[in-house]
Image (cartoon, rainbow, N blue to C red):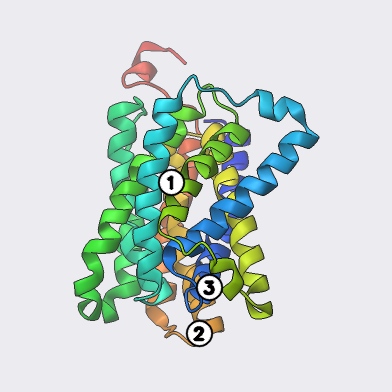
Amino acid sequence: MTAARIGRAVSWMIGALLSFSVMAVSVRELAGTLSIFEVLAVRSGLGLAILLAIGFARPALLRSVTRQRIGLHLLRNTIHYASQYAWAVSLTLLPLATVFALEFTMPAWTVLLAALFLGERLSVSRIGVVVLGFAGVLVVVRPGIAAVAPATALILAAAFGFAITMVATKALTRGETTYAIVLWMNLVQLPMTLLGSDPAFVTRLGAGQIAPVIGIGIAGLSSHYCLSNAFRAGDAIVVVPFDFLRIPLIAVVGWWLYGEKLDLFVFLGAGLIIAGVLWNLHSESRPFRPPGSAANGTR
């Protein structure tokens, strides 16, 4: 990857990280008033309304939406919905930092799936960033890991589903526009959310829920828009490990908004995560030379 492509991928992933954090806080704020199905209905409904408004203003975007890869869209969005439901439920049961930490078996699965199904190259630094990132996650949650054991299966299943979603998203960027990917996501998932929702659930929303409703509507779109563009700029194996940085970020958010414990382990874990990311970025910015190329004089 060139330095320019790496820079674009990093910029889009920063946007995705901030968006996912806003979405997590919005889910927790709405969970006291709405069921998880209804929270996800708000996200999909607002997202679809915003996307259609943009599409009608710019018809070329709507024309980019086709059914040529509908099978992959359906697979991606069904698995993503089930994983997102499990993730949203876990947000109501566990501290924010713990949920995000247990979720981060996902990059390891993504690395394996991307190598198997997308033909992406494995390297020492690409494997190393996953190892260091997961080690950092374990450092962050070490003090409380025994207390959350009963809820572990839920978020681990979500993590594997998110890995499949990541690989499918990368595959879709090879021929599909970002607008089409995000539109199909909301179009497929909205009926699923409404099946489990009270038809009159919007009447339970008051002035106190305006901010989280806006937050989940916008962040639900921006997170996947940024993520799709990050995959367009770089390999999934390079992009996904940046997601580890959500751990220290959400730990600070949880401490700031909810008084959740913030200690030295958060910063030690963050150091391991950042070290791995920087190592991989340095390695990726150097030209790739196949084994034996130096000896053969090739470039």
The answer to which of 273 and 206 lies nearer the viewer is 206
Above or below, 218 relative to 115: below
Kindly identify which residue carries mark 3. 30
User: In the rendered image, is residue 107 in sight?
Assistant: no
Disc 2 to disc 3: CB gap under 8 Å: no
Q: Nearer the viewer, mark 1 or mark 3?
A: 3
* Residue at position x 29%, y 49% in the image: 160
Q: Amino acid at mark 3?
A: Leu
Number of on-image labels: 3
214 relative position to 100: left or right:
right
Distance from Cα at disc 2 to Cα at disc 3: 14 Å
Residue 41 % position (x, y): 51, 57
Which mark is drawn over residue 240? 1
User: Which kind of residue does numbered mark 2 sit on?
Assistant: Tyr
Which class describes the residues within 10 Å of circle 2: few (<14), some (14-19), or many (20+)?
Answer: few
**Mark 3 secondary-structure assignment:** helix
Q: Is residue 182 above or below residue 135?
A: above
The residue indicated by pointer 2 is 258
| Secondary element at tag 1 | helix
Query: Can you give x and y, in whole percent of width and height, for residue 247 in the image?
Result: 44, 66
Residue at position x 40%, y 53% in the image: 276
Q: CA distance from mark 1 to mark 3?
A: 28 Å
**Is residue 281 visible to the viewer in this orientation of the structure?**
yes
Query: Mark 1 to mark 2: distance in Å?
Result: 28 Å
Indicate the secondary structure of the residue bearing disc 2: helix
**Number of the front mark, 1 or 2:** 2
Q: Residue at x 30, y 62 (%)?
A: 155
**Marks 1 and 2, the one that precedes in the sequence:** 1
Q: Position of residue 29 (x, y in %)?
A: 53, 76
Q: In which image quadrant can residue 113 be found?
A: top left
